[in-house]
Image (cartoon, grey):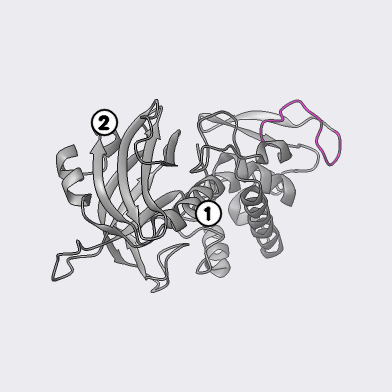
Amino acid sequence: MPELPEVEVVRAGLAPAVTGALITGVQAFDPRALTRFAGSPAEFEAALDGRRIVGAARRGKFLWMPLGGRPEAEEASLPQGLVAHLGMSGQLLLRDPGAPQERHERVRLTIEHPSHGELAVVFADQRTFGSLTIDILVPTLDGAAGGLGTEEPLVPSQVAHIARDPLDPAFLDTRFRSLLRRKDSAIKRVLLDQNVISGVGNIYADEALWAARIHPETPARALSTRAVNRLLAEVRAVLHKALAEGGTSFDAQYVNVNGQAGYFAHSLNAYGRGGQPCPRCGRPVVRVSFMNRSSHYCPYCQRIPRAA
């Protein structure tokens, strides 16, 4: 499943192509891609056609494109955005106008950009767990910008419950430390809780915990302030490194807007390395079942505290 770096790579690729563009056509081929939208595919098409895209923003694993009113509209209605969640295999691709339909294409927007001309924004999704919807934008609780890529203190109502991610300038380390002190759950479970910290999934949780030398089953409340600070630093470091390498691609399902894969899979130290030597100590990395997925860690470098 795409995590923060993969979604941010897509957002950053979309932003220059869609910001200021006019939506001149919408084709919703598959209603399964609109499960979060209350209306019909025809209503979705009608609600977008003729709108202008203001930008491309992200909070955690959610993307949204704030929408302006139609050019002929005299009064602005409630602010809205086109919200995308990539699910397990969703892709947002930029294509030339009239490009052949993608194999798993669900929705296509035709846009006219003042500088780049006509483009197609394609939402493709093999497993159909991803979705697009149109949602109202509501004020953020802290008054800060809704997410990366926007300066407006607005966020889609369906995303408002999602915590800020550790690369968000408005993310508060003090709040995160305070929340951890009240959590009996294992620290890896907390890292995956999108209500506490967003954007960190299974891959990057394993990598950050390995780098911070913290056992994934350590109770969150048992971590010292120094350990939490070290963990946050490693979370940010691994996310920045993954961003620099275009995200993590294990198959053809995750690609950027141009269809290119990321290369961070070649830099993994823990995730997916069960039975292989730990890059730090040489002992075997362990793979265990975790929440219908897997955890990977080094039992020598990442020892659980005895008191826990």
Q: What residue is shown at x 24% (from left), y 43% (from top)?
A: 26
Q: Which residue carries the number 2 mark? A: 30
Question: Which of the 4 image quadrants contains residue 105?
Answer: top left
In this picture, residue 66 sits left or right of residue 228 = left
Identify which residue is drawn at 75% across, 25% down: 275
Q: What residue lies at 47% left-to-right and 52% top-to-bottom?
A: 11
Secondary structure under the numbered disc 2 in the rendered image = loop
Amino acid type at image mark 1: Lys
Magenta residues (range): 271-282
Prevailing SS of the magenta stretch:
loop
224 horizontally vs 134: left or right = right
Q: Earlier in the sequence, mark 2 or mark 1?
A: 2
Which of the 4 image quarters holds residue 139? Answer: bottom left
The answer to whether the residues at label 2 and label 1 have Cβ atoms under 8 Å apart is no
**Which residue, given by chain and number where applicable, does mark 1 sit on?**
183
Q: From the top left corner, tell me how far across and down residue 62 is, in percent.
A: 41, 50
